[in-house]
Amino acid sequence: MSALDEERNRLTSHPNYDAEFASERYSLLESSMVSGAAIYKEAISRAEKANEKARSFDQKVRKEVADHYAKYHQANLDNDTQLDYLESKFEEFEHYVSYQIDVLSETELAKYAKRAELARREAEETFRSDYVSKLKDSLDQVAHIIRELNGSLKRRPFNQEVYQFRYYPNGDMKDILDLVERFSTQDQANVGGLFDPKMSDDPEHVRAISAIQELISDEEKQQDLADYRKFYNFEVDILDLEGNKKTTLSQRIQTGSGGEHQIPFYLAIAAALSTTYRLHETMEGEIVGGFSLAMFDEAFNKIDMVKTSTCMGFMKDIGLQVIAAAPDDKRAVMAANMDTIISVWREGGAVSIDVAYPKEKGQILLNGQSDDTLLTSA
C-alpha cells in the first residue's frame, strides 16, 4: 500500500495530470466493468496504446526536425552537442526545439528579413530604372513615330482625303500607362521603390501596382507587360483637307469599295516596316535607319493610278525601297512610280526578260500632270 501511495502521488503530481478528466474516465470504466481487476486490465491496455501512440509521435517529430536540419542547415542533428538527439526525453527534446524556434525567430529570420528588405528595394529600384524608364522611352518613341508618319501622310492626300494614324490607351493597361507616363528622371533618382508604401494612398498608383503584379504572376500575360505595343490601341482616321474627321478605317471597311479598303492597309504595312527598320528623318531631311525593303505581290491591284502614286509616294517619303510584282495591265502604274521595270514573259519553256528605266518626264506624263508641269520640270 505504501508503494501504491507513492506511485499514485508521483502520477498525480505530474504537470499534465488532470484530476477531473481522470475521475470522468474512471467513472466510465467503473460503469461498464464488473470488478476492479477488469478496470485495472482495461486501464493498462489503454495506457499501452496511448504510450505506443506517443512513441510514434515522438519518432515522427524527431525525424522531421532531423530532416529540417539536413535540408536547411546542412548539418546532422546527431552532431549537435547541445542535445543527445536519440536518447533525450521527449520533454527535453521539446524544450530544445522551442529554443531553436526562438533563435530562428529572433536572430536568423530577423537577419534574413533585413536581407529580404534590401533585396526588395534593390529589385524595385532596378525595376524603376531598367523597366519603367525603358518602357517610357519606348512609349515616347511611339508618339514620335506616329508624328513622323502623320507628317508624311499630310503631304499626300488621297482623292481629297488625308489619312492619319491615331493611338489611344488600351483599357486593360491604362493604369500602368498612366504610372509610366508620370515617371521622370527625378522619380528615378528618388529614394524608395516603385512599390513604396508611402504611395499607397494614391488609388491610381495602387491600381497600377496591382495590375503589374497580376501580369507578373501570369506567365501568359508577362509578354504583354514587356511589349509596349500592347499598351495602346491603334486606328486610322480619315480626314478632309481641312482636317475634319470624316470616318475611320474600321468604319470604312464596312462600307467602302475594295480600293478604299486597300489604301489604309498599304499605309499600315508601310508604317510597320518603317518602324521595324527604325527609319527616321534627320535634321537635314535625310532618311536613315536599317534595312528598308518593302515587297508586294499583286500590288495595288484594286487601286487607281492616282491613289497608287500617292501611296507609293508616301512609302518613298518614309524611306522604303519598294519591290512590287504586278500583272502586265499595271505596267503604266508601275512605270509612273518605279525607277526600274523588269518585264517577264514566258512562252512554253522559254522566258524573256526586258528591263526599262522610266524617266522623270515620262512619269509626269503617266501620272496625268499638265504640260506646264512638264515644261517646268524640264
Image (spheres, helix red, strand yellow):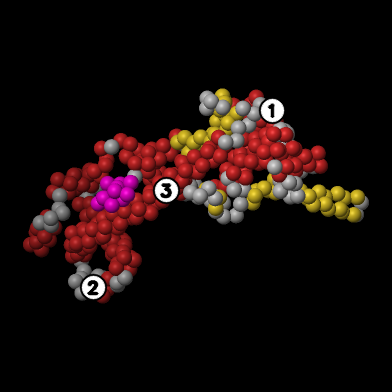
Label 2: few (<14), some or many (≥20) within 10 Å?
A: few
Q: Amino acid at mark 3?
A: Asp
- Seen at 31% across and 70% down, the residue is 74
Q: Secondary structure at mark 2?
A: loop
Question: The C terminus lies in which quarter of the figure?
Answer: top right
Label 1: few (<14), some or many (≥20) within 10 Å?
A: few
Distance CA(mark 3)–CA(mark 1): 39 Å
Distance CA(mark 2)–CA(mark 1): 86 Å
Question: Which residue, given by chain and number where applicable, does mark 2 sit on?
Answer: 80
In the rendered image of this protein, does residue 107 appear above or below residue 226?
below
Question: Which residue, given by chain and number where applicable, does mark 3 sit on?
Answer: 137
Question: Percent from the top left, x then y, of residue 303?
Answer: 71, 34
In the rendered image of this protein, does residue 280 appear above or below residue 94?
above
Residue 121 picture quarter: bottom left
Question: Percent from the top left, x then y, of residue 170?
Answer: 46, 36
The residue range painted magenta reads 184-196
Residue 78 lies left or right of residue 227; in this view the side is left
Residue 82 picture quarter: bottom left
Q: Nearer the viewer, residue 3 or 264?
A: 264
Labelled disc at residue 51: none
Q: Is residue 257 magenta?
A: no
Question: Percent from the top left, x then y, of residue 368?
Answer: 73, 34
Q: Secondary structure at mark 3?
A: helix
